[in-house]
Amino acid sequence: MEVSGNVSPEAARGIFVGIGIVAIVLSAIYGILLIIAGGKLRKQRAYGFCFFVGILDLLTFPGIVLGIFTLIVLTRPTVKELFKGHGAAPSLKPAQAVSPVA
């Protein structure tokens, strides 16, 4: 059975397997980057890395909403201060003792 065209079935299968492997590897790398960025966001570290991953989110369909909101939040001045202070909130005051009500 001959396929019309210049590519043999074995070569076509090899091309599709190669494309599939590349897609799986890129998806795994993207997932690992998202996990790392989530940890960095939680600890308020690596602002540039988190911003970069937020931009990468814009390239995927379901992640576009997450990317937009991540970038909106990361551009706030208060959030930038949090990242500069490495997790110490600049405007929070220490807890004050409250006398019990009798």
Image: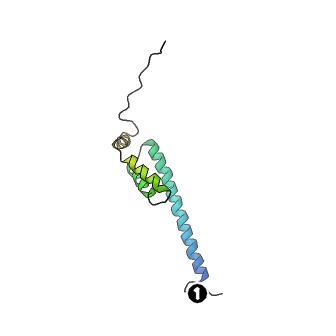
Q: Position of residue 87 (x, y in %)?
A: 41, 39
Q: Identity of the amino acid at label 1?
A: Ser
Left or right of 74 in this view: 62? right
Tell which of 40 and 60 is nearer to you: 60
Numbered disc total: 1
Residue that appears at 52% across and 61% down: 27
Residue 84 figure quarter: top left
Q: Which residue is mark 1?
A: 4
**Helix, strand or loop under label 1:** loop
Residue 44 higher or lower than 61, as above or below = above
Q: Is residue 6 above or below residue 80?
A: below
- Residue 61, how many percent across, how many down? 49, 59
How far from the left and from the top, in percent, is residue 14?
Answer: 58, 76
Identify which residue is drawn at 58% across, 80% down.
Answer: 11
Q: Is residue 90 above or below residue 58?
A: above
The colour scheme applied to this rendered structure is rainbow
* Residue at the limit of the structure toward the right, as seen here: 1
Looking at the rendered image, the quarter that the N terminus falls into is: bottom right
Q: Percent from the top left, x then y, of residue 24?
A: 55, 64
Left or right of 1 in this view: 48: left
Q: Report the residue that reaches farthest toward the left.
A: 77
The residue depicted at 42 percent of the width and 43 percent of the height is 44
Horizontal side of residue 32 vs 1, given as left or right: left
Crowd tier of the residue under label 1, counting other residues whose Cα lies within 10 Å: few below 14, some 14–19, many 20 or above: few
